[in-house]
Amino acid sequence: MRASLLALALATLATPAAADWQATLDAARGQTVYWNAWGGDARTNAFIAWVGQETERRHGVRVEHVKLTDTAEAVNRVIAEKAAGRTSGGTVDLIWINGPNFLTMKQAGLLHGPFVADLPNAQYLDLSAGSAATTDFTVPTDGLESPWRLAKFVFVHDSARVPEPPLQLAAFPDWAAANPGRMTHPAVSNFMGATFLKQALVELSPDPAALQSAPTDATFASQTAALWDWYDRLRPNLWRQGTTFPENESIQFQLMNDGEVDIAMAFDPAAPAALIEQGLLPDSARVFVPEAGSIGNISFVAIPFNAAHREGAEVVANFLLDPETQARQQDITVLGSFSVLDPARLPETAQAAFAALPAAPALPRLEDLGRTLPEPHPGWMTRIAEEWARRYVK
């Protein structure tokens, strides 16, 4: 009798959630989700196109990829709509968002939710307090954004030209002096370029714990002094004497493929293996990480408060968390992004699908990636980019 009552109680608890999700699916059918996402990577663009094909086939939800060069473009559009009193029928349904932009939207009340716990596939996430899936650049997500891909900052070297790359950021200026013009970084106005400086800041800061709070004038001055000294020594020996920089990560890899530089950087540890397969990097490209570890985070999607197709956006967010979708995403022949799901929560069939994914010489193992360093508070990235521009852009 007790077991029957327990089963009845569980059924009673489960039914409303299932009914709510079915209502979401019903409302979403026929909607077109305008997913605003960075459009600078061909593999990511192709993956988003596949997501749209599948959500339309399975749920009748189309996806229109609004390709951005900077996430702030979408954020500013939502801000403008709120200022104009447009509280519904907004032009942005879903945003690939991180860090400072998430903080901006959260603080301004521009986000729909919390919604993540209502997604059926959230059962495969570790949503315990403080987990990587619940924190974005030290800011609690509070269910206002849903994870979709794992990111970790890594360096890439041409092992045929540089068999022993520098394994401390502090050693980069000496390596560059011995190999002038053989490395560069994306422009600091680009996310990747700013992350390179953040990685150096975390390693060179006299008190890394101070980076977990928003910078004040005093802490910014004290924590970045060593960073600027380091960069002053590095910059003259960068590609083209540090007077110009590749616009983004893709152009940087093109320089490596053309033999112009020997060290590059990425926020996707599997990217070099995938690019080798596509003939866009030499076979000798390999990943390395600093001995002290490297910055890591999770990429999220968020739904604006006034999204015109909110239900469709939730369906897409849920589809991104499907174990089948995550396994396809991790396949280096497709995208190569490591999964955000907790392996311990996956059924055996899903675990087997991940285990069967193809390997490659340039694909690092998870244990090769070393310690994950926490992202600094979003305020540091903004101020570092501003200070870099003030010092070095004439």
Image (cartoon, grey):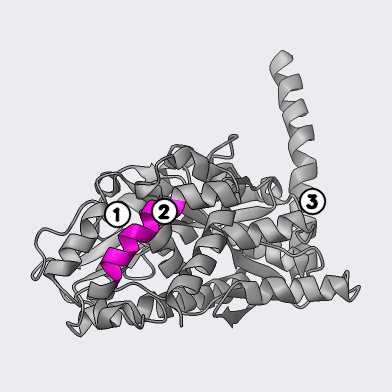
Q: Which quadrant is the N terminus positioned in?
A: top right
Using a 10 Å C-alpha cutoff, classify the residue at mark 2 as few (fewer than 14 neighbours), some (14 to 19) or many (20 or more): some
Relative height, residue 210 to residue 51 (above, below): above
**Residue, far right:** 85
Task: In the rendered structure, find residue 356 and report the number of the disc placed on it.
Answer: 1
Residue occupying the point 38% across, 45% down? 372
Relative height, residue 48 to residue 116 (above, below): below
For the residues marked 1 and 3, what is the alpha-carbon distance in whole angstroms?
35 Å
Judged from the image, the secondary structure of the residue bearing numbered disc 1 is loop
**Residue beneath disc 2:** 225
Q: Which is in the foreground here, disc 1 or disc 2?
A: 2
Q: Is residue 214 left or right of residue 183?
A: right
> x, y (%) of residue 194?
45, 65
Please tell me which of labels 2 and 3 falls first in the chain: 3
Using a 10 Å C-alpha cutoff, classify the residue at mark 1 as few (fewer than 14 neighbours), some (14 to 19) or many (20 or more): few
Residue occupying the point 47% across, 52% down? 297
For the residues marked 1 and 2, what is the alpha-carbon distance in whole angstroms?
47 Å
